[in-house]
Amino acid sequence: MKKPIFLIAVLYAFSTGVSWAQKDSVDYFSLSLEELMNIQIVSASKKAESLFDAPLSASVLTREEIRNAGSTSIMEALRLIPGVIVREQTNGNYDIHVRGLDNVPPNSLILSSTNTTTLVMINNRPVYNYLQGGTFWESLPIDLNDVEKIEVVRGPSSTLYGPNAVSGVINIITRHTDKQGWSVNGSTQYGTQNTSILNGRAAYQFNDKWSVAVSGNYQDRGRDVVYINNRTGEKVTSIDDLGASDVNARYPHPDKSMIKYGVNSTISYSPKEKAQFNLNAGLQDSEVQNIMFDNTGSSTNINTITTDSRYVDFQSSTYGLNTQISYTDATQYPVKGMKGSQYDYNVTDASLEYEIPIKGLSLKPGVTYRSATYDDSRYANVAEKGGILNGEKTMETLGGSLRADYSLLNEKLRFTGGLRMDKFTHPGDWLLSYQAAVNYKLNTSNLFRVVYSKAYRSPFIFDTYVDYHSLQPLANNMFMEASSTGNKNLDLLNSKMFELGYRTMLRSNLSLDIEGYHTITENYTALILGATTITPQTAPVIGHTSLTIENIPLKVRQQGVTVSVNYVVNKLQIKPFVSFQKTKLEDYSPYFSSTAATPSASNNMDPATYNFNNVSDVDHKFTPSAYGGAYINYALSSKFNFNLNAYWFSKQTFYHKDNFTYKDGVRGVENIDSKVLLNATVSYAPIKQLRIFVNGRNLLNRKSIEYYNSDATPAMIFGGINFDF
């Protein structure tokens, strides 16, 4: 693959990355509750500012809040943030969406239901997976002990961070060393379901300029061995009862939902006040059982997924010039045991942005380059079409952006926004994303905002290059063949949003944030069943069916409102939040067949009538119409702390393609009941540097499932310690 070495070399020579996200470390545990109400955020405008003044709908979750709430992973901690839908699939594995767009389109593959529209980053380094979009959360090399804070921006934000920030951005910002000499911190806890979680970090600051840090994390989570047999709709408690081929290869640890570890290192150098350089590197290895891919050859939708990866990330910030260069190399097996599903991949990200201040106006021109290469040739017989891609496939993106931030009327009126142009390998056109936000600060206690934006999702390797062939044996050495092929001329998914927001400080210790939004998302894709051709029966293959990736007419329209409150009094902090939304599917068809397809149950035996162009408008039933939570923390004394937090969502219905295969109202349909999850943590600190805690998750023992064919994780109790020396 040809890489733009010159561009990367120039960026490295200027060496000025986006390390402002790490630069200012804050000791959140020393802040008062009132100060925590108005913490700084960077991700909403790419500059440090008060959360109250942020021009977009945004939230910050601090290290203190995560620790007090007893969250056991980064994924679970997202339940403490407004506007985020978090469903547990198996112990510690989650399906996560900002505002929704989940199970779209319904009645399709499971893969179409995962979140491919939220950009997840670690210190502004994208961890997006370009095979079919989204985030493999278990493959993040970091864990909670590495986190300084989590910033979430809701709504299309591609002008800030490039493609894939369609429904929002989750930026995980790691800890920065600011203590002279040695510092050592970490945690260990053990709980029910045979769950062990270990974290540790050691850092040394030589002087005001140099510091180094190394961290490690490990999780081992158990699960009850229960699977849903799709063919019968019944639960089985042994992998041998699934009727799957080579079950031991597919499920090497059926009693484990997660086994993972990660190691990370950081070297920081700050020669001057306005110059900061960071070099981060690390690796991870994970094996989980969750629900992301349809498991060909097995009768259950829980898969074993393995990932091992390595990364290096160089960032710097010098006098307004910011640069970041990162490289990730990995091997992934998304459906372990499934022939042809394993591949290697590497991703290169490079960005440069420069701030030009002009009397109240800030201009930030920037350029980005991304390259993602996926290759299955080491694991499949490419000559016989034994893989999914059958060779090395590359997707490159070149982008340019210009952002502006302008204040007037004594900074009461503020305009922020930008334009961004991106060009992908396929399609080869330049595409325009934009964002315009107007903030009016009536006084120090009231702020109104209006936002209009559009963002694109990047093309996928799978949609563009898939080259999958399968043979189903018949009698007398004859076969039925099916082939799936990609499409290089797809229109890319995009979302437009109009949003109104209002923030107010009703009192010095009481704030209210309201955001109302309307989004339109279109250019979805689906695997469409084509014609079947028949050859003479004397040939080895007597029938061939083609499937192709195509755009479908579907348009998703969503309206919603999110309300969040932050109240502090004495040693008590209360943060409730709730979202209400309605999602409408326009021009939706449940039939993924062309007019030339062979009659089958999936097209009512009449593809000429029941095909992907046979559309209607329906209410979407899987994105919950209401969801929210609450964080309640009471510091009983300097040694004792009590936290109660909750997360809940309304009932939903998930539709899988088996709904049209079996048509019995059971298989392929998952009616998910409304659910309230109540958690509590009690901690005792005998000395300032040591904290002992007992942590209860799902204390109401609501054992209903939260996702299609998923586990029903019971109440869990943890005990452990945190230390910080």
Image (cartoon, helix red, strand yellow):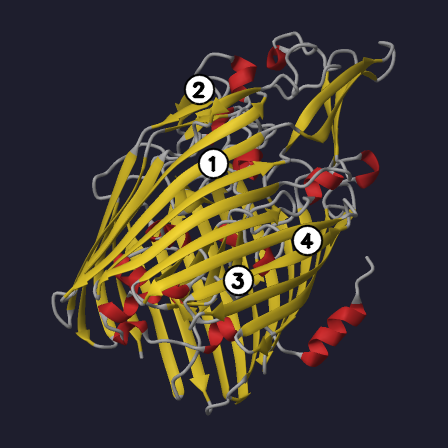
Q: Are marks 2 and 3 in contact (CB under 8 Å)?
A: no
Q: Is residue 555 above or below residue 326?
A: above
User: In the image, what residue occupies the spot 52% across and 42% down?
Assistant: 115
Q: Are marks 4 and 3 in contact (CB under 8 Å)?
A: no
- Judged from the image, the secondary structure of the residue bearing numbered disc 1 is strand
688 and 208: which is toward the camera: 208
Q: Is residue 283 above or below residue 93?
A: below
| Number of other residues with Cα within 10 Å of mark 1, as a class: few under 14, some 14 to 19, many 20 or more | many
Q: Which mark is residue 601?
A: none
Q: Determine which quarter of the picture holds residue 505.
A: bottom left
Q: Position of residue 210 (x, y in %)?
A: 51, 87
Residue 388 visible in the snapshot: no
Nearer to us: label 3 or label 1: 3
Residue 455 visible in the snapshot: yes
Cα separation, mark 3 vs mark 1, equals: 24 Å
User: In the image, what residue occupies the spot 63% across and 16% down?
Assistant: 614
User: In the image, what residue occupies the spot 60% across and 57% down?
Assistant: 159
**Residue type, label 3:** Thr
Cα separation, mark 2 vs mark 1, equals: 33 Å
Q: Which mark is residue 558?
A: 1
Q: Quickly name the residue at label 4.
A: 345
